[in-house]
Amino acid sequence: MFNILHKIFRELFGRESSRSGETRFISIKCEPLAEPKVHFNSVTVTDKTPKNDAVGDKDFIMVVYQGKPLWALFRCPCGCRHVISLSLQKIHRPHWKVRKYSEGRPTVYPSVWQNKDCCSHFWIRDGRVYWCGNADKRVKSSPDRTMRGQSAFGAMKCGMVYLIIDYINFGL
């Protein structure tokens, strides 16, 4: 575990060791991420899976049956109107975790990466959508995209930061 975190921090903060044992720092220029608008204002909890037609553009629906989270459903924030269904069941691979913060907005772990249709790749944190720059070029442009044109390496660093934060928050 420590080795993984050490590698992530070394990649993020540019620390390198040479064969002679001396340590040098690499200057990495990072632009601060703009805070996107809130996309999902709340989490609607239901015990039955709604039909796709019933899911609105800014709805985030969690299906919970007998106290066990089963699914999270929402429309893709890129604007393609595709309904994304994420399994919240630990027996499924892959599966996601959803946490509601103090204002009731959702955070999803890990990131969502559509491998069909629009090929969007994004994180949902506190109801805000953070786009990764390594999504397919077919993705429709959206007014709240905050990371448009970012390199794949920049998206990887972004993802690592969110991974570390979510690791701490979710205790994974």
Image: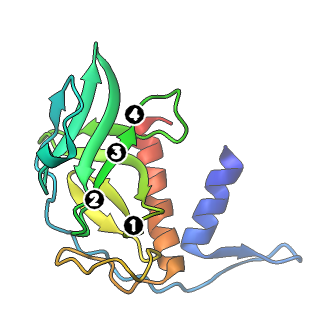
Q: Residues within 10 Å of mark 2 (few under 14, many from 20)?
A: some
Residue 40's disc number: none
- Tell me, yes or no, whether the two marked residues, 4 and 2, touch with CB atoms within 8 Å: no
Question: Earlier along the polypeptide chain: callout 4 or callout 2?
Answer: 2
Mark 3 or 1, closer to the camera: 1
- Tell me, yes or no, whether the two marked residues, 1 and 2, touch with CB atoms within 8 Å: yes
Left or right, 33 with respect to 102, comes to right
Secondary structure under the numbered disc 3 in the rendered image = strand
Task: Please give the residue where the numbered disc 1 appears in the rendered image.
Answer: 117
Question: Earlier along the polypeptide chain: callout 1 or callout 2?
Answer: 2
For the residue marked with disc 2, what is the amino acid?
A: His
For the residue marked with disc 3, what is the amino acid?
A: Ser
- In this view of the protein, which residue sits in the foreground, 168 or 149? 149
Q: x, y (%) of residue 146? A: 27, 76
Task: Please give the residue where the numbered disc 3 appears in the rendered image.
Answer: 85
Secondary structure under the numbered disc 4 in the rendered image = loop
